[in-house]
Amino acid sequence: MKFTRTDIEDVVIVEPKVHGDERGYFVETFRADKLEEFLGYKINFIQDNESKSSRGVLRGLHYQLHPAAQTKLVRVIQGRVLDVAVDIRKGSPTFGKHVSVELSGENKRQLLVPRGFAHAFVVLEDDTVFAYKVDNYYSPENDRGILFSDEALDIDWIIPKEELKLSAKDQVQPKLAETDDIFDYTVNYYA
């Protein structure tokens, strides 16, 4: 496995080695020991989730507050998405900045989105299957979001806004500047 830090060093691209031949392929999609060795801390993933979506579906920007904050390891099994992680750690040198990475069933890339980041993805192909691991269970009372179209975040979703399909909840999330429900850069949320 190859691990690459992005422009926001806590967000990591994971590229598993694909072994392919005329029969198909084999890929090891997750190795806790290798990931933890690279990161320098332990992550205990406790749940796997999967969704199927059509082109133009945008899910996010979502996060959960401490003590239910989540690390996500996301990937695409079939199709393509633009995956986005936004730094919402007040005091961080990259606060309000984001990383965008195309994930696809073909490129097999994954993105590690740590605690302290809002996460979203927009689907670029019909019948896209998106899967991810989390290290904390869903907590309705700690569930939060940021408006996908917040101009201050300057995210290019690739698909025109009028073609996006969002949940009612995601259409009315607050802008980042309008919420105090975020993280503190000086706190270790893995302790």
Image (spheres, rainbow, N blue to C red):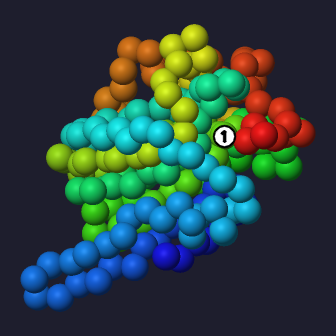
Looking at the picture, does residue 12 appear above or below residue 150? below
Horizontally, residue 170 falls left or right of residue 91, namely left
Horizontally, residue 58 falls left or right of residue 35, namely left
Q: Residue at x 51, y 57 (%)?
A: 111
Looking at the picture, does residue 89 appear above or below residue 28? above
Kindly give the residue lying farthest to the top in the view shown: 141
* Image quadrant where residue 117 sits: top right
The residue indicated by pointer 1 is 115
132 or 79: nearer the viewer: 132
The answer to whether residue 19 is seen in the rendering is yes
Q: Quadrant of the C terminus?
A: top right
Residue 63 percent across, percent down from the top left:
58, 30
Q: Residue at x 38, y 35 (%)?
A: 58
Residue 95 percent across, percent down from the top left:
78, 42
8 or 70: nearer the viewer: 70
The answer to whether residue 157 is seen in the rendering is no
Looking at the picture, does residue 153 appear above or below residue 32? above
Amino acid on which the number 1 mark rests in the picture:
Arg
Q: Secondary structure at mark 1?
A: loop
Kindly give the residue lying farthest to the left in the view shown: 23
Q: Residue at x 77, y 31 (%)?
A: 183
